[in-house]
């Protein structure tokens, strides 16, 4: 009896929790997200503490492009929905649908990232650079940390999807997919706070 | 049943570089932590020799600043932390009846990240000077008025901090998911409980340090303005982040030490730990309160009376669960058949020493009094009573207690007792007088003092004590060398132990338990002994045991970040990106290649004398 050879309908109902390794991975990842919560909490605290310290830079009210960030919000939240669809498909053992929904998730995440880069370039042209003020440093550090998490997530998803055709859905690959889903939701939730605290609160001053 | 996967198994040096076995990782932590402990101790000796007499010129002011910064940083992050992790690795899986930790690969990665972080920090001595802004690295001293040494501090701590975080998550999952059948939470040995709570603290405290170090790094290397007042920054921000991490860190160190003391006192009193459930409650309560008190390090910053009062009350509250622990240890000793081995001497010596540290802790927790104590030698005396009198005495008790289980050799008791008495007397000689040096007005972190202030004699006494502690450490090293020259002579259960680790051979075989044990009560092994059994009740039939494969990837991943760190410091983007790429490529290899591990077959287990 070798490992990870169960496929298709032989798999148990929740293949990600079928092995102790899988359960460890999921629990450990929840704890990791707890640590990430403190990390982003600290970055938000820094931002809130420094958000009025604009020095000679442009004020957030005139800087922020709310239309752009609203579109980004829509794109990223939709990508969270599609990752749910992917995990749902995985639970139905419908690997083709799972693969498809993860590709949609990837494309939406990539769109978000491209929009964010365009947004940052626009801000830099308006004189809102990393070194301009305490506000600008805190802005780019917080939003940039989130953007880096999206980038890392996209790279991670590729390393899951590329070998998937060879490996298939097994009790080894299922926890990896599931844990990626957790990560992607977390990145999404953080963005909800970024949008509220950085952009909406920035717009109203 | 055929297990087709064959895995290359290494020997010699490669075995140590590729190991994912928690018992070998424990030894790596112990050796590396011991190495850094000696370095930090030599730095302390130089500090004390400089302060031996007024207007001494053994080292200059600049070197003194580097010495005190490196002493504090090394002792906390690279000596005490890894030594705590050494015992967590060596003991926790055995105490819960597990074959391994939850994440053996990450366990190795955590060690190597810590190790290269420590090496990086210490290379600063040879490259442009060590960090000199104190172990707390307050901004703007650390941003605008310090040399490149602080970059070593930032990146060294960042790399080792990631390793510590990984270790914390690993032990949380291990304790929750890997317990043997019957090992309920309220049957966990006290050291395991303490390690579990300490791991929780690591998880929630270290990310705050990560962010603080990121901000400091961005300010120093990329021109950010977090702590730059002229561009709207706020230097107090650093103090908050540092202490939101830093105060829980104290409990991350001392809770496992409390756990060790509970085990040692119970074993050598030949009694069940008094008030086990109260001990568990007290440990959890201390862990919770640890996050509520950080600003008591900042009473003199000017946060206002309301904030000072709240943080003062929260701090004094910690004395309650700590007091519960002290009394429970005393009641465990009370009426026990106490055996005065080296381990139990360290544990008994711990109690009054730590009580003094706790009492001065309540003193400095009072803001009006703290305005007098702040930045004086009184504070130095206080935290050394908690860290040396608490953590180090606890670790030394654990070292003498678990040494036979880790290495399979007994330490010499005569040398051990010599170690205890020299170290213990040296410790009190060094730090007790520092209370008075502080009350007489000597500030901490000064490289010399003027004669004729009645400080001369007390400082000389303190230095003599420090030398005595050094001699105690030498006795310990001699003891280790002597025992390593002997053959393996430790019986499985040399101390008449009560917990599961004493039920298996010394040193433990790589699979720990041939058959996972069925735990039938608190003090699982002692319960079996009382029921007249010589070994544990098995919970499963004898079968092949699955083991994780050894791998070199954790080492290479850590080297990648080590290289990237230098790239950041010297603003060389190619080196920085190259180093990070090495780490990422290792992560991708790890992700793509499934590790099937290998099996130890029944025949091999039977060869080693198991009953089928």
Image (cartoon, helix red, strand yellow):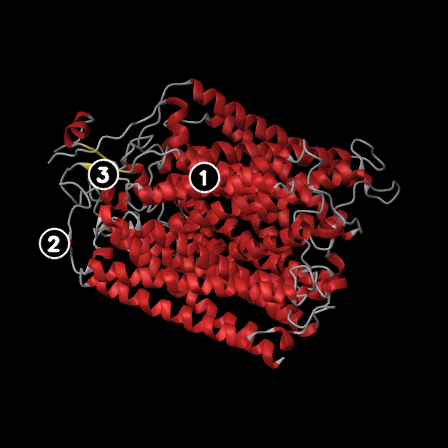
Give the numbered dot on residue B546: 3
Estimate the x, y position of residue B119 in percent, counting from the top left.
57, 35
Label 3: chain letter: B
Mark 1 sits on what residue? B557
Label 2: chain letter: A
Q: Nearer the viewer, residue A183 or B126?
A: A183
Look at discs 3 and 2 and give the one toward the viewer.
2
Estimate the x, y position of residue A199 in percent, counting from the top left.
55, 74
- Is label 1 in a helix, a strand or a loop? helix
- In the rendered image, the quadrant that contains the N terminus of chain A is top left
* Residue at position x 78%, y 33% in the image: B59
* Residue at position x 17%, y 25% in the image: B607
Q: Is residue B563 above or below residue B247?
A: above
Estimate the x, y position of residue B302 in percent, counting from the top left.
73, 67
Is residue B198 something one can see in this rendering?
A: yes
Q: Is residue B404 above or below residue A6?
A: above
Mark 2 sits on what residue? A10
């Amino acid at each position: 009896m070798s490992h990870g050879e169960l496929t298709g309908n032989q798999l148990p109902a929740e293949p990600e929790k079928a092995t102790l390794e899988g359960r460890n991975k999921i629990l450990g990842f929840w704890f990791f997200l707890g640590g990430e919560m403190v990390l982003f909490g600290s970055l938000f605290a820094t931002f809130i503490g420094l958000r009025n310290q604009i020095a000679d830079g442009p004020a957030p009210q005139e800087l922020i492009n709310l239309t752009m960030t609203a579109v980004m919000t829509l794109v990223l939240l939709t990508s969270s929905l599609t990752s749910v669809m992917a995990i749902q498909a995985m639970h139905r053992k419908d690997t083709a649908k799972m693969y498809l929904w993860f590709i949609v998730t990837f494309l939406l995440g990539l769109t978000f990232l491209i929009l964010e880069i365009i947004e940052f370039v626009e801000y830099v042209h308006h004189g809102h650079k990393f070194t301009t003020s305490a506000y600008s440093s805190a802005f780019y550090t917080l939003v940039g940390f989130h953007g880096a998490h999206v980038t890392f997530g996209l790279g991670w998803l590729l390393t899951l999807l590329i070998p998937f055709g060879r490996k298939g859905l097994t009790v080894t690959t299922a926890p990896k997919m599931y844990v990626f889903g957790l990560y992607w939701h977390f990145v999404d939730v953080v963005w909800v706070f970024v949008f509220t605290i950085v952009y909406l609160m920035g717009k109203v001053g | 049943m055929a297990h087709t996967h064959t895995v290359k198994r290494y020997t010699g040096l490669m075995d140590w570089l590729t190991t994912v076995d928690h018992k070998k990782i424990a030894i790596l932590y112990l050796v590396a932590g011991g190495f850094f402990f000696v370095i930090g101790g030599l730095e302390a000796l130089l500090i004390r020799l400089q302060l031996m007499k007024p207007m001494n010129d053994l080292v200059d002011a600049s070197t003194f600043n580097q010495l005190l910064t490196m002493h504090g940083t090394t002792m906390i992050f690279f000596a005490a932390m890894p030594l705590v992790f050494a015992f967590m690795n060596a003991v926790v899986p055995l105490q819960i009846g597990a074959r391994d930790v939850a994440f053996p690969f990450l366990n190795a990665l955590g060690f190597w990240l810590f190790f290269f972080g420590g090496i990086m920090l210490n290379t600063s001595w040879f490259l442009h000077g060590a960090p000199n802004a104190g172990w707390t690295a307050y901004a703007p001293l650390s941003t605008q008025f310090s040399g490149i040494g602080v970059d070593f501090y930032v990146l060294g701590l960042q790399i080792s901090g990631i390793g510590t975080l990984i270790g914390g998550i690993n032990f949380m999952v291990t304790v929750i998911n890997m317990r043997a059948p019957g090992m309920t939470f309220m049957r966990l040995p006290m050291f395991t409980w303490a390690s579990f709570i300490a791991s929780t603290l690591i998880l929630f405290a270290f990310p705050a340090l990560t962010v603080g170090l990121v901000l400091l790094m961005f300010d120093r290397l990329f021109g950010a303005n977090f702590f730059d007042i002229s561009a709207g920054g706020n230097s107090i921000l650093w103090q908050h982040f540092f202490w939101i991490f830093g105060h829980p860190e104290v409990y991350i160190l001392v809770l496992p030490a409390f756990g060790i003391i509970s085990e040692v006192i119970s074993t050598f009193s030949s009694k069940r730990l008094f008030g086990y459930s109260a001990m568990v409650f007290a440990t959890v309560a201390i862990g919770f309160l640890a996050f509520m008190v950080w600003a008591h390090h900042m009473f003199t910053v000017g946060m206002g009376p309301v904030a000072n009062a709240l943080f003062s009350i929260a701090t004094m509250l910690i004395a309650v669960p700590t007091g519960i622990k002290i009394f429970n240890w005393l009641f465990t000793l009370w009426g026990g058949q106490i055996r005065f081995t080296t381990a139990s001497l360290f544990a008994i010596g711990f109690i009054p020493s730590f009580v003094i540290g706790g009492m001065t802790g309540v003193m400095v927790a009072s803001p009006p009094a703290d305005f007098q104590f702040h930045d004086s030698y009184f504070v130095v005396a206080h935290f050394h009573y908690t860290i040396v009198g608490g953590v180090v005495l606890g670790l030394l008790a654990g070292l003498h207690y678990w040494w036979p289980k880790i290495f399979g050799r007994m330490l010499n008791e005569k040398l051990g007792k010599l170690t205890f008495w020299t170290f213990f007397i040296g410790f009190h000689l060094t730090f007790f007088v520092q209370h008075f040096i502080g009350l007489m007005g000597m500030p901490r972190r000064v490289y010399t003092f003027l004669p004729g202030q009645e400080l001369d004699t007390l400082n000389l006494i303190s230095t003599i004590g420090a030398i005595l502690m050094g001699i105690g450490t030498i006795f310990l090293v001699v003891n280790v060398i002597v025992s390593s020259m002997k053959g393996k002579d430790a019986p499985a259960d040399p101390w008449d132990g009560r917990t599961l680790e004493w039920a298996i051979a010394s040193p433990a075989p790589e699979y720990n338990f041939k058959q996972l044990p069925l735990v039938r009560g608190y003090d699982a092994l002692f319960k079996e002994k009382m029921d007249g059994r010589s070994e544990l009740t098995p919970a499963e039939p004898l079968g092949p045991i699955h083991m994780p494969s050894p791998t070199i990837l954790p080492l290479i991943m850590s080297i990648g970040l080590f290289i990237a760190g230098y790239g950041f410091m010297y603003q060389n983007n190619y080196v920085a990106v190259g180093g990070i790429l090495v780490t990422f490529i290792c992560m991708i290899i790890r992700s793509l290649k499934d590790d099937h591990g290998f099996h130890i077959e029944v025949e091999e287990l039977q060869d080693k004398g198991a009953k089928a």
